[in-house]
Image (cartoon, rainbow, N blue to C red):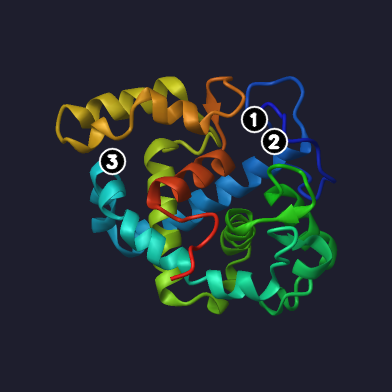
Amino acid sequence: KKTQLGCRPCVFEGLPMGCGSSHVSQTDLFNLKLTREIQAYHKQRMEQKRKMARRNSLQAMCLAFPRVRKGFEKLRQGYCSLEDKKTNGIEFEVLKKAEIFAGMEEELLLSYINESDVDENKVIDFREYVLTLTFIFFLHPDMREKYNQTLVAAFQIVSSSWCAFDSTGYGWISRKKAMAIINGESSKTTYGTIFTEERFNEMDWDRNGEVSFKEFFLAFLEWSGVEQEKDNE
């Protein structure tokens, strides 16, 4: 991914290049590491339950949105317990001490928090908080036992949806590949009309024709109805 999001300290050495650029930033390396772990997670699930492969479609993705929303809303209470109402988010120093991250190396955890800070304001909002936990879920299998099953189900849907577009493990979704899938699904179901070129543009922040997992995931949260702030009922 061409990095408008800024460079981070490198904690992912030894990764081969795959993004087609002569200059690869630390954010690019992070994206490659993350998406490869997602591919590995997805492959493991497919080997255990091959019938799940049939769910890799836009139709299944759309039908799963309520389950995704239900899963990630499970994180709302933990987020609100740490949120500073004055900043409408969680400061890095507060977040890194959260119980859910107990046992993690501080430097590594901060690198994930930095990657999640999309607007680079040093404050983590709810979707960025979910993004941080998503990095940890896919990159640290040993910590998955801390996640309840409703949340795990949401991550399973995310991994299936991402791999439906990035089936080769390239690490980014190209406009050409996405539109080919979208157009193919549109001919078979009405759900393809939900994923239009406009939707692709919503994900492609820098308009370079490629979408990283981080861009995909934040758009996925929005499509699923995961609100930035929960209205008081």
Identify residue for label 1.
Answer: 1
Where 41 falls versus 79 (above or below)? Answer: above
Is residue 52 left or right of 103 when viewed as pictured? left
- Which residue extends farthest front? 233
Identify residue for label 3.
Answer: 58
Count the labels in the image. Answer: 3
225 or 42: nearer the viewer: 225
Mark 1 in CB contact with mark 2 (< 8 angstroms): yes
The kind of secondary structure element at disc 1 is: loop
Where 188 falls versus 123 (above or below)? Answer: above
Q: Earlier in the sequence, mark 1 or mark 3?
A: 1
Mark 1 in CB contact with mark 3 (< 8 angstroms): no
Residue drawn 70% across and 65% down? 85
Which amino acid lies under the numbered mark 2 shown in the image of this protein?
Asp
Which amino acid lies under the numbered mark 1 shown in the image of this protein?
Lys
Identify residue for label 2.
Answer: 28
The percent position of residue 133, horizontal first and vertical second, equals: 61, 63
Residue drawn 73% across and 78% down? 102
Which amino acid lies under the numbered mark 3 shown in the image of this protein?
Leu
Residue drawn 63% across and 62% down? 136
